[in-house]
Amino acid sequence: MIGTTTWVISDGYVPPGSSGDDPALASHESACMLNTNAEPARVELTVYFADREPAGPHVLTIPGRRIWHQRLDELVPAGTDYSVVIQSDRPIVVQHTRLDSRQAANALMTTIAFPAG
């Protein structure tokens, strides 16, 4: 099996704006998840904040041998610091990606999430 069942993205921040009108280049963050198992993976995302109680769990299913890109800006208000804990009933792999297009020179950051499971 590839992956683990608990992942942490501790440096979350959805940039509060974009420099252009192209929706494909809007500032955002994603949790990119890979399920190499033959069976579906039930995944829960719990979002933590500095100034309020956690949100979630947000539940999703990743089909067997498939990927899922969860846009985190759908779960978190723009301009907000946050962390997210991702728990799965099967081992998965999680990568964190941020597109910051507040300036004309876009910045793309990606890193593997912390495998805590």
Image: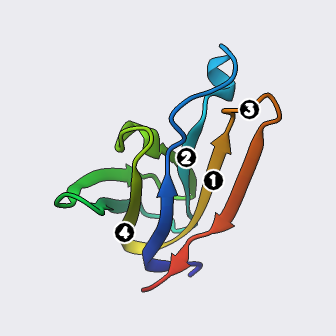
Q: Nearer the viewer, residue 92 or 53?
A: 53
Instruction: Work out whether 20 lies above or below 58.
Output: above
Mark 1: give few (<14), some (14-19) or many (20+) Cα within 10 Å: many
| Residue at x 83%, y 35% (from the top left corner) | 105
Residue bearing the label numbered 3: 103
Q: CA distance from mark 2 to mark 4?
A: 15 Å
Badge 3 marks a residue whose secondary structure is loop
- Mark nearest the camera among 3 and 4 is 3
Q: Report x, y in % for residue 97.
A: 63, 53
The kind of secondary structure element at disc 4 is strand
Q: Residue at 42% of width from left, 55% of height from top?
A: 81
- Residue type, numbered disc 1: Thr
Along the polypeptide, which appears first: circle 3 or circle 4? 4
Disc 1 secondary structure class:
strand
Residue indicated by mark 1: 97
Of pointers 1 and 2, the one earlier in the residue sequence: 2
Q: CA distance from mark 4 to mark 1?
A: 15 Å
Q: Quadrant of residue 103?
A: top right
Q: Tag 1 or tag 3, which sits nearer the N-term? A: 1
- Comparing marks 3 and 1, which lies closer to the viewer? 3
Q: Amino acid at mark 4?
A: Val
First-in-chain label (4 vs 1):
4
Which label number is shown at residue 29?
Answer: 2
**Dot 4 corresponds to which residue?**
85
Q: Earlier in the sequence, mark 3 or mark 2?
A: 2
- Farthest residue toward the bottom? 117
Q: In the picture provided, is 9 more to the left or to the right than 99? A: left
Give the residue displayed 45% in from the left and 73% down from the top.
8
